[in-house]
Amino acid sequence: MRRHDASNPKAPSAFIIATRNRPKELLATIESLVAQTVLPAELCIVDSSDAAEVRADIEALCRTAGVPLDYFHPAPKGLTVQRNVGMERTTGDPLFFIDDDVWLAPDCHEEILKEYGRWGRELGGVRATPINGARPRWYTIFWRRFFGMGGWWPEASGRMRPGFFVEGVSDSSDVKELDYFNGWFMSYRREAIGLERFDEALSGYAYQEDIDFSYRVRQRGYLLLQTPRARVHHLKTGTNRMSPFDLQRMNMGNQFYLHRKLMPQTLKHRAALWWALLGLFTLNVGKAVQQRNHGYITGLVVGAWEQARGRGLIDPAADRSVGVPDPEKPP
């Protein structure tokens, strides 16, 4: 970790972090941010936590590094809502969205800015490459490509498939053009975003809100790039994660919602969605056996059945509040 040096050069960029009840992870993320070789002009933390436990520590870090901080707490709950709040409270450009459980390599911000400098106004956004990105075996990649169900592997196409699944690039030898971004680290020119906002209909954990937002920017005609020269470690903390049943059920709701919203509703695209889900079901059977949790299967099946009947978006937390039972927990 570099020293927190207020004499480091600054760029006119703004970082936005939406967080909830992850104080230790958030503090570690900020420590890596204020240690960047090039510092941002703004940091906005939109915190919906029950208590802002590490706010004073973060304020001290930012003060020492000379990074202006806007700490908004208490904030309304919901990832999409919080990110929209951050967009409204900042003016920096480019605009960075990072999760509260990432570690940025010291030159990550600097390398992203260099990429913006190499391109003109056609470039809408740049994202970093994950440290220790997924490297599945060849037969897993074949399976995912055959069913068009997306995934992450080195030198993938970075394209959106007809079922609204992306072939994500976990690593590459050079800069790659993408149809999507992942929300744990993504950046955009404000001009490219325009009036786009995160879809607040996607509540809570908001599965695929990042792909939804970035794909809309891509559809506006802007280039989206991933550079291997900027590196981020996504820690993927288990704090506040849903059960496999709830997660799979909600994922189905979001998948169908976004498919209807952004993809042509032709026979080809609808068939591609169900074909991909068949491949996903098979993989989830293996995961359920491996982790001894049937929620990976039951959640997907229940979710797909609900969507086939027109249920729409799912909010497991809201369902629990009205007494819908969780099949993974004893009565």
Image: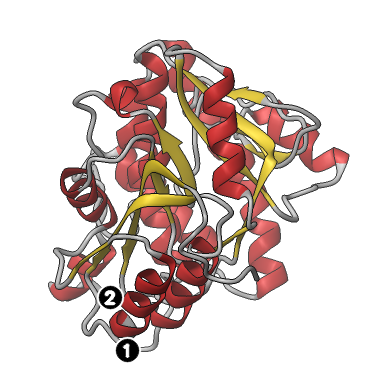
Amino acid on which disc 2 is placed:
Pro
Residue at x-position 29% and y-position 80%: 55
Q: Which mark is drawn over residue 270?
A: none
Instruction: Report the label total.
Output: 2
Separation of marks 1 and 2 at Cα, in angstroms: 8 Å
Quarter occupied by residue 53: bottom left
**Residue at 36% over, 79% down:** 60
User: Badge 1 is on which residue?
Assistant: 331
- Side of 217 relative to 300 (left or right): left
| Of 76 and 253, the residue lying toward us | 76
Q: Work out which residue is located at the far right of the displayed protein and give it.
A: 138
Q: Which structural element holds mark 2?
A: loop
Crowding at dot 1, Cα within 10 Å, few <14 / some 14-19 / many 20+, comes out as: few
Residue 266 vs residue 109, the one in the foreground: 109
State the residue position of label 2. 325
Q: Residue 144 location, x and y as percent?
A: 69, 35
In which image quadrant can residue 79 be found? bottom left
Quarter location, residue 322: bottom left
Q: Amino acid at mark 1?
A: Pro
Looking at the image, can residue 160 be seen?
A: no
Image location of residue 208, percent across then percent down: 41, 43
Relative to 68, say whether 127 is above or below. Answer: above
Q: Earlier in the sequence, mark 1 or mark 2?
A: 2
Circle 2 residues within 10 Å: few <14, some 14–19, many ≥20: few
Q: On the rendered structure, is 62 left or right of 322?
A: right
Query: Would residue 162 appear left or right of 118 to someone viewing this image?
Result: left
Question: Which residue sits at x=15%, y=66%?
Answer: 75
Residue 156 is at least partly visible in this image: yes
Residue positioned 67% across, 62% down in the render: 287
